[in-house]
Image (tube, rainbow, N blue to C red):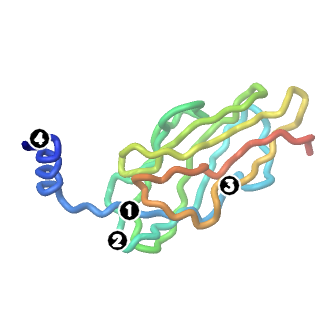
């Protein structure tokens, strides 16, 4: 008996080009880092420093893309330039903090225009507070291949009793 699904899968595996998946590491938050405050309903630019931690240059098409949940701005996708092995670059996204208190969570993907997610979480202060505190979510040097990269985007907005 022939397993048709296995045969078709083997054919496509054999015929498809051997593509290596790019790898990246989170280096640090560049803007809106741990302990910084942002008032509600404020435009800001969030920047992460990343590194090509793989052995090959990244191909064209690597991007950071909104995939679901709350959206903190109007930008759906930001292209990331090709990086040589061990090269470091900054990736920036324009965002806007929500205007009402509550827990907000959105996901953005970093991939070769494929499915993978990272999260951005916001928890705004109650009315009358002066802003919200930012703490880092992503561990320093979190290496994953871009095709299965799933982690915090680097920002968690938590209420604090103002400065």
Residue positioned 11% across, 51% down in the render: 11
Is the C-beta separation of discs 1 and 2 under 8 Å?
yes
Q: Of helix, strand and loop, which one carries label 3?
A: loop
The residues bearing labels 1 and 2 have C-alpha atoms spaced at a distance of: 7 Å
- How far separated are the C-alphas under marks 1 and 4? 32 Å
Which residue position holds label 4?
Answer: 4
Q: Spatial distance from mark 1 to mark 3, Cα to Cα?
A: 25 Å
Q: Earlier in the sequence, mark 1 or mark 2?
A: 1
State the separation of the CA atoms marked 2 and 4: 36 Å
Q: Where does label 1 land, which residue?
A: 22
Neighbor class of circle 1 (other Cα within 10 Å; few <14, some 14-19, many 20+) is: many
Which marked residue is nearer to the observer: mark 4 or mark 3? 4
Compare marks 1 and 4 and give the one earlier in the sequence.
4
Asked whether the beta carbons under mark 1 and mark 3 sit within 8 Å of each other, the answer is no
Left or right relative to 13: residue 154: right
Whole-percent x and y of residue 149? 48, 53
- Point out which mark residue 154 bears: none
Do callouts 1 and 4 mark residues in contact (Cβ within 8 Å)?
no
Q: Nearer the viewer, mark 1 or mark 4?
A: 4
Considering only order in the chain, which callout, 3 or 1, is on the residue closer to the N terminus? Answer: 1
Of marks 2 and 4, which one's residue comes earlier in the chain? 4
Q: Which residue was labeled with disc 3?
A: 31
Residue that label 2 marks: 56
Among the two numbered marks 3 and 2 on one chain, the one whose residue lies closer to the N terminus:
3
Q: Nearer the viewer, residue 157 or 87?
A: 157
Say if 36 sits above or below 159 in the image. Answer: below
């Amino acid at each position: 008996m022939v397993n048709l699904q296995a045969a078709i899968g083997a054919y496509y595996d054999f015929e498809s080009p051997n593509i290596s998946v790019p790898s990246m590491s989170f280096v640090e938050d560049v803007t809106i880092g741990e302990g910084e405050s942002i008032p509600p309903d404020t435009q800001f630019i969030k920047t992460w420093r990343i590194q090509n931690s793989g052995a090959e240059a990244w191909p064209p098409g690597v991007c950071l893309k909104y995939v679901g949940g709350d959206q903190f701005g109007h930008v759906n996708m930001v292209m990331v330039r090709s990086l040589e092995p061990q090269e470091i670059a900054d990736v920036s996204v324009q965002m806007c903090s929500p205007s009402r208190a509550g827990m907000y969570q959105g996901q953005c993907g970093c991939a070769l225009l494929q499915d993978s997610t990272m999260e951005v979480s916001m928890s705004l202060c109650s009315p009358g507070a002066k802003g919200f505190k930012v703490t880092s979510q992503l561990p320093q040097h979190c290496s994953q291949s871009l095709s299965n990269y799933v982690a915090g985007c680097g920002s968690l907005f938590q209420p604090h009793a103002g400065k």
